[in-house]
């Protein structure tokens, strides 16, 4: 086996996702780093959580049903965890942002994500600088 999925758990995919976010943030904080959790976009789930385009990408319907259930669970993480940010709808106004699998971004998509991440970091740095100067 070339990858491990961890030990079996009774958690849902969303619960496991949240646990992973919490662990990554704790590890980053313990190391003196800032963690920016990102709920990534994909072509199969629209901004409102509705399934879309599944028939065009060749993914089985069961895959999309599981993906939709996961996003239903994690879409509100940013309201509960301040270090998590939703990029679910980041590509809504753009075409050509996914490669054929509907999950991985093209260079255009990567640039959009990178600019948004840089915005998060810059806003955080500005907030910290304003807090330090007061």
Image (cartoon, rainbow, N blue to C red):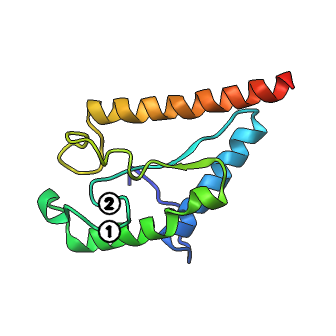
Classed neighbour count for the residue bearing mark 1: other residues with Cα under 10 Å, few (<14), some (14–19), many (≥20): few
Residue 100 x, y percent position in the rendering: 17, 47
Asked whether the beta carbons under mark 2 and mark 1 sit within 8 Å of each other, the answer is yes
Quarter of the picture containing the C terminus is top right
- Looking at the image, which residue is at 24% across and 51% down? 102
Report the disc number at residue 10.
none
In this picture, residue 28 sits left or right of residue 12? right
For the question of whether residue 21 can be seen, the reply is yes
Disc 2 versus disc 1: distance between alpha carbons? 5 Å
Mark 1 = which residue?
50
The residue tagged with tag 1: helix, strand or loop? Answer: loop
- Looking at the image, which residue is at 30% across and 40% down? 105
- Looking at the image, which residue is at 70% across and 33% down? 33
Residue that lies at the very extreme toward the front in this rendered image: 134
For the question of whether residue 7 can be seen, the reply is no
The residue tagged with tag 2: helix, strand or loop? Answer: loop
Q: Is residue 84 above or below residue 44?
A: above
Residue that lies at the very extreme toward the right in this rendered image: 134
Mark 2 = which residue?
46
Residue 20 x, y percent position in the rendering: 59, 56
- Looking at the image, which residue is at 51% across and 73% down? 12
In this picture, residue 25 sits left or right of residue 48? right
Quarter of the picture containing the N terminus is bottom left
Residue 69 x, y percent position in the rendering: 41, 72
Q: Is residue 25 above or below residue 107?
A: below
Classed neighbour count for the residue bearing mark 2: other residues with Cα under 10 Å, few (<14), some (14–19), many (≥20): some
In this picture, residue 11 sits left or right of residue 107? right
Residue 10 x, y percent position in the rendering: 56, 77
Residue closest to the eye, 123 or 22 = 123
């Amino acid at each position: 086996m070339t990858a491990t999925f961890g030990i079996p758990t009774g958690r849902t995919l969303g619960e496991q996702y949240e646990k992973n976010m919490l662990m990554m943030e704790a590890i980053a904080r313990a190391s003196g780093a800032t963690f920016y959790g990102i709920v990534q976009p994909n072509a199969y789930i629209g901004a409102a959580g509705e399934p879309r385009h599944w028939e065009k990408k060749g993914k089985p319907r069961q895959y999309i049903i599981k993906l939709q259930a996961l996003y239903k669970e994690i879409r509100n993480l940013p309201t509960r965890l301040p270090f998590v940010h939703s990029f679910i709808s980041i590509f809504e106004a753009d075409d050509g942002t996914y490669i054929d699998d509907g999950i991985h971004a093209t260079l255009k998509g990567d640039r959009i994500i990178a600019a948004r991440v840089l915005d998060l970091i810059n806003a955080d740095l500005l907030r910290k600088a304003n807090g330090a100067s007061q």
